Image: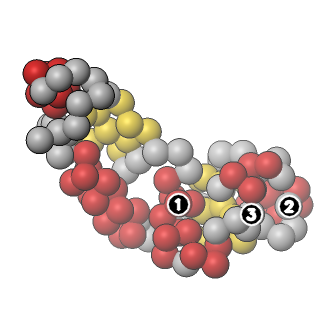
Amino acid sequence: CHFDIDCFYAQVEELRDPRLAGRPMAVTQKYLCVTANYPARAAGLKKLMAATEAKRLCPEVVLISGEDLTPYRHCSKRVRQVLTRFGPCEKLGLDECWVDVTREVDRRVAAGGPGADPP
């Protein structure tokens, strides 16, 4: 299975500061918005948009510097730790990975099918 976490950097920032949830917010690197949450996207913000253009489109957007990758690396590692419960996990990027769920699927089928609860 391929996992790609939508607006990962923005979600990490919302976890770090819950006051940001529901407010237009974008994470910037090198003066570009590398991601934006859904309220900011609804206001017209797009990936790799200049921060100045983002502010013009949505003056209330909160711009968070994402230059320090430490919190994103930490959250990425935690996500992969959870996903490895279902099979081997191969990192593709901070917000993306492959998980081989073959054994988990086989185990659940053997336990009684797709709706069977794991033992």
Decide which of tag 1 and tag 3 comes sooner along the chain: 1
Q: Are marks 1 and 3 in contact (CB under 8 Å)?
A: no
When asked about the image quadrant of residue 29, the answer is bottom right
Q: Left of 39 or right of it: where is 34?
A: left
Determine contact: label 2, label 3, CB under 8 Å: yes
Q: Nearer the viewer, mark 2 or mark 3?
A: 3
Determine crowd level at label 2: few under 14, some 14-19, many 20+ residues with C-alpha closer than 10 A: some
Residue 73, relative to residue 47: is it above or below?
below
Identified by mark 3, the residue type is Pro
The residue that mark 3 highlights is: 24
**Dot 3: within a 10 Å radius of its alpha carbon, few (fewer than 14), some, or many (20 or more) residues?**
many
Instruction: Determine if residue 82 is in view.
Output: yes
The CA distance from mark 2 to mark 3 is 8 Å
Which circle marks residue 11 in the picture? 1
Identity of the residue drawn at 27% across and 58% down: 77
What x and y, as percent, mark residue 43? 83, 52
Name the one closer to the observer, 56 or 71.
Answer: 71
Question: Along the line of sight, which residue is nearer the eye, 14 or 54?
Answer: 14
Return the residue at label 2: 58
| Residue at screen point 28% across, 33% down | 98
Separation of disc 2 and disc 1 at Cα?
A: 19 Å
Where, quadrant-wise, is the C terminus in this rendering? top left
Q: Is residue 61 left or right of residue 96?
A: right
Where residue 38 sits in the image (x, y, percent)? 69, 52
Task: Please tell me whether residue 107 is drawn above or below residue 24 in the rendered image.
Answer: above
* Helix, strand or loop status at disc 3: loop
